[in-house]
Image (spheres, rainbow, N blue to C red):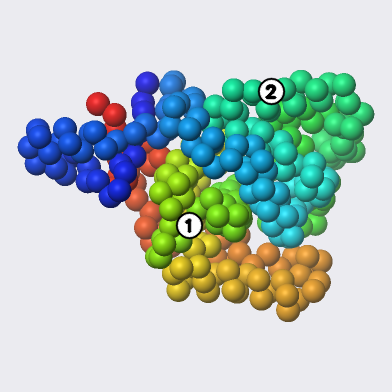
Amino acid sequence: MCAFTGQADGASSPANTAGKAAGAAASQRQFPVMRIEENSHKPNDFSKNLLKQIGGVPRLLEMTTCFYRKVMANPHLEPFFASTEVSHHAPRLANWVAEKMGAPERPWTREKGSRKQNEAELKQQILYPNHNGDLELEDFLVHDRSSAHFAGWHCPKRVGCPMHKVGDHFKLDDSRVWMRLHFWACREVGLIGPSSGERTKLQVDFENFYTRFIGHFVRVYERSAPAFARVECQWSDESTAEGKANVQRYRALQLETPDYMEKRLHGMDDVVGLRDPAEARRRVAGIRDDGWPYSDDGLFVREE
């Protein structure tokens, strides 16, 4: 088992603290943040308490609703979705995150179980190769995360879209755009605060946990993506000059070009198309080969 501990109120890492007394004092200010067992994320007391403190599923639903509105308005990510109904996707993601954080009512499992009663509503058409290798439309039942990912890879809307090929799995650029919009939604609803300026301890705790949480699970999309989670969280930080410019530029594109969706103007030119992990790392400042989100850094230390 590997657990991570975050340090409250700017406490220094025991690795950087001289003497047993100082190390003991620092350890008293630590609390478990993310728990990994055999490569799987498990809820712990910290994540359970954090979920309660932020407001539970309703608060997460506020964030996921904001997130999916951004996704459906982004011409690079939208082709992965047959349905653009935000109310169709947002509750499922909110329930899933809540359950992973330790919601005792297990909202995602409960909701997933009820889907079997409405199979007709779960069917969607995908493009899949026939015995000759030609793509054909066929009905597909989307009943969980894995089947939803498969449906996204084979979504007919991907035909003719730049940087899309029906059947391709999520790439590094897809994952980075996804994380940018996701963390931006966290900021807009107040779950993550500004890096420069006033922010609450709860916002700090949530960012410390959630960037690692997303860093762990985004590996399912693309194995090289976790290292970029911290950078993509900073992309929308409007308390910095760069973050403010990023958000203003993105919003201006959508406001000034009403047909940006039809023209596939995604506003992420620095990311979309950059799929080689080594080249992407070279171009991005702040990427460290430290094994994050499973390594020590300035905010987290391994639990002894």
Residue 135 image point, x, y percent: 85, 40
Residue at horizontal 59 percent and vertical 74 percent from the top: 248
The relative height of residue 178 versus residue 291 in the rendered view (above or below) is: below
Residue at horizontal 71 percent and vertical 36 percent from the top: 92
Query: Does the image show residue 107?
Result: yes
Three-letter amino acid code at disc 1?
Answer: Gly
Residue 132 image point, x, y percent: 85, 33
Image quadrant of residue 115? top right
Mark 2 nearby-residue class (10 Å; few <14, some 14–19, many ≥20): some
Name the side, left or right, on which 261 lies relative to 270.
right
Residue corresponding to mark 2: 109
Three-letter amino acid code at disc 2?
Answer: Thr
Mark 2 or mark 1, earlier in chain: 2
Name the side, left or right, on which 74 lies relative to 228.
right
Residue 303 image point, x, y percent: 29, 29
Instruction: For mark 2, give the secondary structure.
Output: helix
- Give yes or no for contact between labels 2 and 1 (Cβ–Cβ under 8 Å): no
Q: In this view of the protein, which residue sits in the foreground, 21 or 154? A: 21
Instruction: For mark 1, give the secondary structure.
Output: loop
Residue corresponding to mark 1: 193
Residue 186 image point, x, y percent: 57, 52
- Give the number of the mark in front: 2 or 1: 1
In the picture as drawn, the residue positioned furthest to the right comes out as: 120
